[in-house]
Amino acid sequence: MVFAIFLTICNMLIPAIMLGFGLMFEKTSPGKINYFYGYRTRRSMQNEDTWKFAHFYCGRLWKKIGFILLPLSVIASLPMFWMQSEDGRGILTCVIEGIQIILLIGSIFPVERALKLNFDEQGNRRTTNEA
């Protein structure tokens, strides 16, 4: 039982982190452009405008994904409380967290697409006529 509770808490970590950083990034980007903290890609680090836009967009996306994943992860973890096999619990945890990681990494694609639609290759904001 204790192990199932521990794994359920582990399964809630990625969605909780996405939700927390999503709320934070939606409100403000991390200060100056840096290589250590924040949404860091070549396109997002071109200038302050792309940096702020990427964090706002990523924040909104992570907030939505985290808000959806958090209760789904708890629900998906419920069978662990009836499983007798610790191997089964471990496999279920790997599957849940694997899906979470895919969604976390996959969130890069819509953010980069939004950056590409809103900014040119030099990081200048596109006008409505260009898009």
Image (cartoon, grey):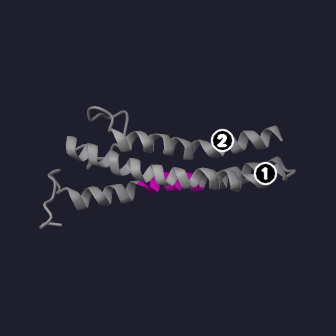
As rendered, which of 46 and 79 lies closer to the eye? 79
Query: Residue 23's quadrant in the figure?
Result: top left
Q: Residue at x 76, y 41 (%)?
A: 5
Please state the horizontal and vertical placement of residue 81, each as a whole percent of the image.
Answer: 81, 49
Residue 51 in percent (x, y) is at 26, 43
Relative to 22, residue 102 above or below: below
Per the image, label 1 sits on a secondary structure element best described as helix
Left/right of residue 39 with respect to residue 119 in the rendered view: right
- In this figure, which residue is indicated by the disc labeled 2? 10
Please say whether residue 23 is one of the residues in the magenta stretch.
no
| Mark 2: amino acid | Cys
Residue 14 appears at what percent x and percent y?
56, 44
Along the viewing direction, whichever of 18 and 34 lies nearer the viewer:
18
- Which span is picked out in magenta? 99-107
Classified by dominant secondary structure, the portion drawn in magenta counts as helix
Q: Look at label 1 and name its amino acid.
A: Met
Residue 93 to residue 116: above or below: above
Q: Is residue 125 above or below residue 38?
A: below
What residue is disc 1 on?
80
Residue drawn at point x = 35 percent, y = 41 percent: 27
Callout 2: 10 Å neighbours few (<14), some, many (20+)? some
